[in-house]
């Protein structure tokens, strides 16, 4: 990895016991083979990392090594490569736990993504604890993955959904949240960082407010774990869900962290092999956590890739990642309005309140057309509702285009975006 470190320095949060001396995204880009190509005759400018990040060579090689050298099922084979597969799989769990400062690796349940992790909680904890009249509090900015599972749950259990509104610039109304807490909700679920607006929510403060009225808290960390230091012990939440594919890891990898006592009390989510201790014709005894929630053959190679991705980001230092993206957001918020006449930006204007996401529109030009023309110049951005249709309704927007950043993103990418958007306006007569 192209990161210089000094030995024996204090850790920068969870991760290896080294502190990076410097972080040069131009050097880091060399670790990502996909970025070394041209699209339509132009260097690839990948600005859709909030949807899915690219993968460094270290992750790709770790997965390749698994499939080439010790591909076997885990927790089953009493032979050399089977035991190695099990050891690497469980080591990946430990790496993931360290990355978010979980107190116990057994509190990490591997899932396919944050969506599955949230559904696990909704089905297992929710169907055990939410009853008629019970309230679940969400926000207006939630990704569909942290909305639809709760809709299904309250419809089935005859519960209620309440929502924390946002201001016009995309900040949660904590004064209204305080009022909603008087309903004594069973659960409060919200995103750590908005995938559409980039808003960084005050998790610790909201957790303390919810706990004061006896509510449990689930945090959707899909857009936070790849971009900001996350310490689940410091945040104090009860459940924390995240995806691997947004944090340089393979698609099909992700995790749920939850407090041990909650996991132990929850019934299984899926049934079958591995999640059992004993099976009889008319009853079964379930396995310990976390394996109670990991039925069937897991995505071993993907989990190993997730562990390596956590190591990669940890070696860079998540405070460095956050500082880098703060710089990019500051630059983007300055350059886009200065160089692209009439562009409309959404979300908090203060980079301190915002992750590496910048949604925008060009008046009179549909976001899909914006994205298509940008692709002619090798620039990849997202266009649509970004799985946040209620948020777009709240802002009275049919759709937006979105640029989003990662460790490999540079100011040069933003310069290319500005130039590309001016060309979009030219094409459409702006």
Image (cartoon, helix red, strand yellow):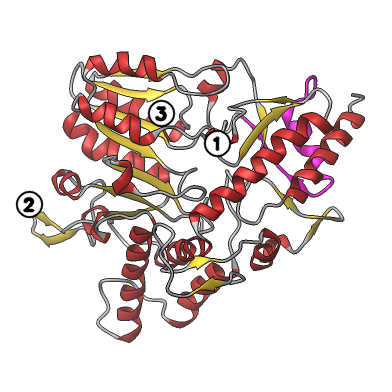
The foreground one among 361 and 212 is 212
Q: Name the residue tied to disc 1.
A: 352
The answer to whether residue 120 of the structure is visible from this angle is no
Locate the C terminus and report the quarter of the image it occupies.
top right
SS under mark 3? loop
The answer to whether residue 117 of the structure is visible from this angle is yes
Q: Name the residue tied to disc 2.
A: 282
- The circle on residue 381 is none
Locate the N terminus and report the quarter of the image it occupies.
bottom right
| Percent coordinates x, y for residue 150 in the rendering | 34, 28
Q: Residue at x 63, y 19 (%)?
A: 397
Disc 2: CA contacts within 10 A as few (<14), some (14-19) or many (>=20)? few
SS under mark 2? loop
Q: Residue at x 21, y 19 (%)?
A: 184
Q: CA distance from mark 1 to mark 3?
A: 26 Å
Q: CA distance from mark 2 to mark 1?
A: 57 Å
Q: Nearer the viewer, mark 2 or mark 1?
A: 1
Cβ atoms under marks 1 and 3 closer than 8 Å: no
Cβ atoms under marks 2 and 1 closer than 8 Å: no
- The circle on residue 147 is 3
Lower sequence index among marks 2 and 3: 3
Lower sequence index among marks 1 and 3: 3
| Percent coordinates x, y for residue 265 in the rendering | 13, 44
Q: Residue at x 87, y 56 (%)?
A: 41
Q: Residue at x 57, y 21 (%)?
A: 169
Cβ atoms under marks 2 and 3 closer than 8 Å: no
Asked if residue 286 is positioned above or below residue 208 in the image, the reply reads: below
């Amino acid at each position: 990895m192209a990161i210089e470190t000094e030995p024996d320095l204090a850790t920068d949060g969870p991760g290896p016991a080294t502190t990076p001396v410097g972080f040069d995204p131009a050097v880091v880009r060399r670790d990502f083979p996909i970025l070394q190509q041209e699209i339509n005759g132009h260097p690839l400018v990948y600005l859709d990392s909030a949807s899915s990040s690219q993968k460094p060579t270290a992750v790709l090689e770790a997965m390749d090594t698994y499939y080439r050298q010790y591909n076997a099922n885990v927790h089953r084979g009493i032979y050399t490569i089977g035991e190695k597969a099990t050891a690497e799989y469980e080591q990946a769990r430990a790496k993931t736990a360290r990355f978010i400062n979980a107190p116990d690796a057994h509190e990490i349940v591997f899932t396919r993504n944050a969506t599955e992790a949230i559904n696990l909680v909704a089905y297992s904890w929710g169907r055990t604890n939410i009853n008629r009249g019970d309230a679940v509090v969400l926000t207006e900015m939630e990704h569909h993955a942290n909305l639809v599972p709760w809709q299904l749950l309250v419809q089935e259990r005859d519960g209620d959904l309440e929502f924390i509104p946002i201001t016009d610039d995309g900040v949660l109304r904590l004064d209204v949240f305080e009022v909603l807490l008087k309903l004594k909700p069973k659960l409060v679920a919200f995103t750590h960082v908005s995938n559409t607006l980039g808003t960084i929510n005050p998790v610790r403060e909201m957790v303390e407010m919810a706990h004061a009225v006896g509510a449990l808290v689930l945090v959707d960390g899909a857009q936070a774990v790849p971009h900001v230091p996350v310490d689940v012990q410091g945040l104090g939440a009860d459940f924390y869900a995240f995806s691997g594919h947004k944090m340089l890891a393979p698609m099909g990898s992700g995790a749920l962290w939850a407090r041990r006592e909650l996991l132990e009390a929850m019934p299984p989510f899926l049934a079958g092999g591995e999640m059992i201790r004993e099976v009889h014709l008319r009853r079964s005894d379930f396995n310990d956590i976390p394996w109670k929630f990991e039925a069937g053959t897991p995505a071993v190679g993907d989990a190993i890739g997730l562990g390596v991705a956590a190591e990669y980001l940890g070696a860079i230092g998540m405070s460095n990642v956050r500082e880098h993206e703060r710089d990019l957001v500051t630059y983007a918020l300055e350059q886009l309005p200065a160089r692209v006449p009439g562009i409309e930006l959404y979300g908090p204007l203060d980079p301190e309140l915002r992750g590496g996401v910048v949604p925008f529109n060009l008046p009179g030009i549909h976001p899909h057309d914006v994205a298509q023309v940008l692709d002619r110049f090798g620039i990849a951005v997202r266009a649509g509702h970004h799985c946040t249709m209620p948020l777009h309704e709240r802002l009275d927007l049919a759709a937006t285009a979105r640029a989003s950043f990662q460790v490999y993103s540079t100011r040069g990418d933003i310069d290319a975006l500005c130039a590309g958007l001016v060309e979009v306006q030219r094409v459409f007569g702006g």
